[in-house]
Image (cartoon, helix red, strand yellow):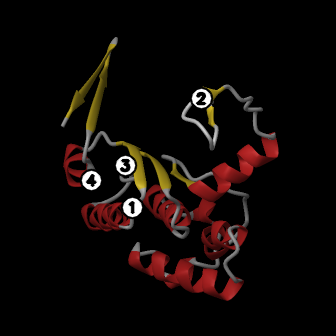
Amino acid sequence: MPERSSSSTEARPSTCSPPNPGEVVEIRLSTIGYVSQFLRVIPRVAALDVVTEPAIANGKPSEEAKALAKTLLTRLNIPERLWSLAPATFSGGEQQRVNIARSFIVDDPILLLDEPTASLDTANRQTVVDLINEAKSRGAAIVGIFHDAEVREAVADRLFEVGQQRLEMAS
């Protein structure tokens, strides 16, 4: 990357060493949120703890993280009676909603979404669309895979259709 001299407009080459692997991990943890199609967490950990973990890892006090988690779980229609249970015992849709709460508890500047609404009913799908649009409103970059055309139309600003051997951009 060229480095500019303060006394002239002439660019001179500089070296840019690769980042330390620990720095890369730290950057990823502090900037990228991710919703996969499937919730993968440590077995026997309560849903409330699964959701609070990313917030605590990013420096939020435990009580504040729990309050945020409770708000998200309520909003995503996870009954309070399930919060102390491990998500492995939940239905696919309930697991997906815990997964979504876990990803949206931190205001990451980048969100990667892999079919976030695939296992959800209409009401919960709309809640997730609302969460995505709120993240966009606060300036988050959203990159997602959505097979559901209705959801895709509700959240996409740009559409990249991927087919066999082609990539098209639609506005």
For label 3, the residue is 118
Residue 83 location in percent, x, y? 58, 78
Sequence-wise first label, 4 or 1: 1
Residue at 47% in and 82% down: 71
Amino acid type at image mark 1: Gly
Q: Is residue 35 above or below residue 82?
A: above
Q: In the displayed orientation, state which residue is furthest to the front.
A: 7
Judge depth for marks 4 and 2 and give the one in front. 2
Do the residues under discs 3 and 2 have CB atoms within 8 angstroms? no
Sequence-wise first label, 1 or 3: 3
The residues bearing labels 3 and 2 have C-alpha atoms spaced at a distance of 50 Å
Amino acid type at image mark 3: Ala
Q: Residue 139's mark? A: 1
The residues bearing labels 1 and 3 have C-alpha atoms spaced at a distance of 24 Å
The residues bearing labels 4 and 3 have C-alpha atoms spaced at a distance of 15 Å
Disc 4: CA contacts within 10 A as few (<14), some (14-19) or many (>=20): some
For label 4, the residue is 155
103 sits to left or right of 41: left
